[in-house]
Amino acid sequence: MPLIPGLEVVRSAIDGYGVIAKRPFAADELIAEVDGVAWNAQEDLNDRYSLKITEEILFDMVDQTRWINHSCDPNAGVEVGLGSDGQPWARIVALRNIRVGEEIAYDYAFPIELAEPCHCGSANCRGLIVEVAEE
Ligand SMILES: [Zn+2]
């Protein structure tokens, strides 16, 4: 797959590999269109690197975006949906201005049954990688 311009996979201060910005991104700017493979949620897939598109459809990230870490204080967000052809799509969008060299992270918001310990180091870390309960 082609490399996404403006991103680089590095060893991360958060966990394992991570992705840093090689150029500045402005708030609301598109960081990357995610290249992925659609799976049925019933199939036996390691879904650690998958985005949930609908209750039935997962989207396994197969490009550099796969290595973007979770943060409880993210600088990026994920938008997902289904195209008119029924194929899932996903994109990573900056939530605020991102500096060169800053690690890009979004909130994985795992459902409670998949929650795992979080070491993101942000001041408001929830201690778990888990979705925020609706108020
Ligand atoms: Zn955290």
Image (cartoon, grey):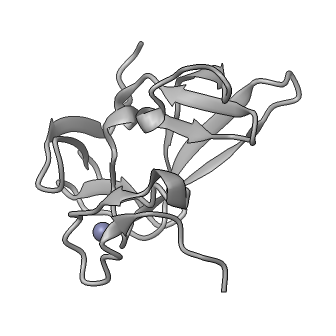
x and y, in percent, of residue 25 in the image: 38, 57
x and y, in percent, of residue 91 in the image: 57, 42
How many numbered discs sit on the rendered protein? 0
Q: Say which quarter of the image contains residue 10.
A: top left
Q: Nearer the viewer, residue 61 or 2?
A: 61
- The quarter of the picture where the C terminus appears is bottom right
- Left or right of 112? Residue 53 is right
- Residue at 68% x, 26% y is 42
Query: Please, which residue is most extreme toward the front here?
Result: 113
- The quarter of the picture where the N terminus appears is top left
Q: Is residue 24 visible?
A: no
Compared with residue 16, is residue 4 higher up or lower down, i.e. above or below?
A: above
Compared with residue 53, is residue 2 higher up or lower down, i.e. above or below?
A: above
x and y, in percent, of residue 131 in the image: 53, 65
- Residue at 55% x, 20% y is 44
Q: Say which quarter of the image contains residue 123.
A: bottom left
x and y, in percent, of residue 101 in the image: 17, 54
- Residue at 63% x, 32% y is 58
Image quarter for ligand 1: bottom left
- Left or right of 116? Residue 85 is right
- Residue at 30% x, 76% y is 125
